[in-house]
Amino acid sequence: MSDVTIHSINLIASDPTVKGGRPFIIGTGVALEYIAAAYAYRKESPEQIAVGYRLTLAEVHAALAYYYQHQAEIDGQIRAAEEALLKAKEQGLGTRHPPVLR
């Protein structure tokens, strides 16, 4: 085993000052939860994700590998983002005009 070299792919990072500490693809700012949601929930192929987010296939595959190693955590982040979006929508946030009927 002394001749074995272990290679790591350093494409994923997390920083408490970036994206709330959620993991992202280095040099892009794309959070892994976006890649995971595109792949697992919207059924986009890695090639479609790469084009849509302007990533390399290596970056997409690194993100998916990370996702599968941390699936429960990232699925939780996806659910939290969906809940926040629904709450904002219910409050009429992000609309150009206030809701006419409540």
Image: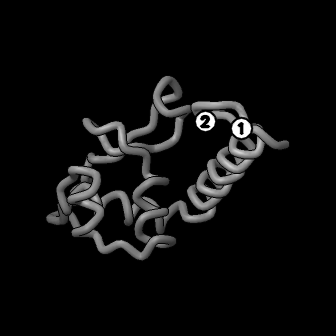
Which is more toward the observer, 83 or 102?
102
Q: Mark 2 points at which residue?
A: 95
Which residue shows up at 53% across the image and 28% down it? 16
Residue extending furthest toward the top: 17
Figure disc tally: 2
Residue type highlighted by circle 1: Gly
- Residue 35 vs 84, above or below: the answer is below
Q: Which mark is residue 41?
A: none
Picture quadrant where residue 1 is located: bottom left
> Residue at 49% across / 54% down in the picture?
33
Name of the residue lying farthest toward the right:
102
Tell me the quarter of the picture where residue 56 sits.
bottom left
Residue 5 is left or right of residue 32, and the answer is: left
Instruction: Identify the residue position indicated by label 1 in the image.
Output: 92
> In this image, 3 relative to 36: left or right?
left
Q: Nearer the viewer, residue 64 or 39?
A: 39
Splitting the image into 4 quarters, where does residue 30 fall? Answer: top left
Label 1 packing within 10 angstroms: few (<14), some (14-19), many (20+): some
Residue type (three-letter) at the residue carrying disc 2 = Thr
- Residue 59: x %, y % from top left: 25, 55
Proximity of marks 2 and 1: CB atoms separated by less than 8 Å: yes
Percent position of residue 95, x then y: 61, 35
Q: Position of residue 101 (x, y in %)?
A: 81, 43
Going 22% across and 69% down the picture, which residue do you hit? 47
Q: Which residue is drawn at 43% across and 45% down?
A: 31
Element on which disc 2 rests: loop
